Each structure stands twice: as C-alpha cells, then as structure tokens.
Amino acid sequence: EKIAYKTLQRDLDENRGKVMSIYGPVTQVSDAGSVQYIRMQFNKGADGTWYNPVIVVANEDMGAKEGDMISAVVKVGDVFEEQDVNGDPVMVPGFELVFVDKVE
C-alpha cells in the first residue's frame, strides 16, 4: 500500500499495521538489546536526492549498514518524535519489519 509521508507523520490509527514496501538509502544503524533500528530515507526527488527520514524497527539484524540501499516489507508502526536543529519537534514515521527483500 502507498501512504504519503505527511500522512504517516500524523500517526493515524487507521494506518497502523498496514503493510508497505519501502526502498531507500540507510543513513544510520543502531541496536538496543535484541532490537535493531535502521534510519533510512523514504522519498527520492526528481534531482535524485533522497529525503524524509523513517525508522524501521526489527527484532533481528537486518544485515544492512550505513550507505546501503535497502528494500523491505514493513508494517506501519509508531511515530518517533525527534527534534530538528532548532529544537522544534519533528515527527518521524516508524515501521515494524516484516522481512528484508534486498540489501545492496
């Protein structure tokens, strides 16, 4: 299913659990116990620049590292509240990993 980034940022109950396929560059990988978090970019502009961060949460090592391109099937999960460089809140959509399709 296709859901717009701005819609995902709104954390709507009706979207939670919907399955999507996403693809983009990995910008950060972190672990907390048995949970792995991958930050990746969600949209690609006409000029080839990737933008709009999302976070994929998995209970396994996704086999991706910073700089990889990843294709995954995910379920819409919680939205993470972060701060931008000015300290203003930014809503970053989160996903739960269903499976990794490909890492390049």
Image: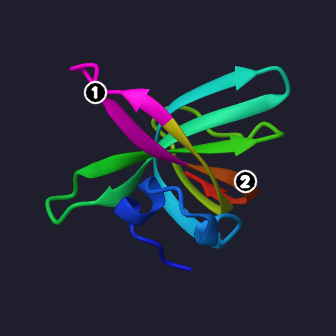
Residue 60 visible in the displayed image: yes
Q: Taking 37 as reference, is 91 above or below it?
A: below
Classed neighbour count for the residue bearing mark 2: other residues with Cα under 10 Å, few (<14), some (14–19), many (≥20): many
Q: Which mark is residue 88?
A: 1
Q: Amino acid at mark 1?
A: Asp
- Position of residue 50 in the picture relative to residue 15 (left or right): left
Q: Tell me residue 92's x, y (percent).
A: 45, 43
Q: Which residues are magenta?
A: 81-93
Q: Tell me residue 36's x, y (percent).
A: 72, 32
Residue 45 falls inside the magenta stretch: no
Q: Taking 63 as reference, is 21 above or below it?
A: below
Q: Secondary structure at mark 2?
A: strand
Residue at the (75%, 43%) spot, across then down? 58
Sequence order check, earlier mark of 2 and 1: 1
Q: Amino acid at mark 2?
A: Leu
Residue 89 falls inside the magenta stretch: yes
Q: Tell me residue 28's x, y (percent).
A: 50, 29
- Position of residue 82 in the picture relative to residue 13 (left or right): left
Q: Which mark is residue 57?
A: none
Q: Secondary structure at mark 1?
A: loop
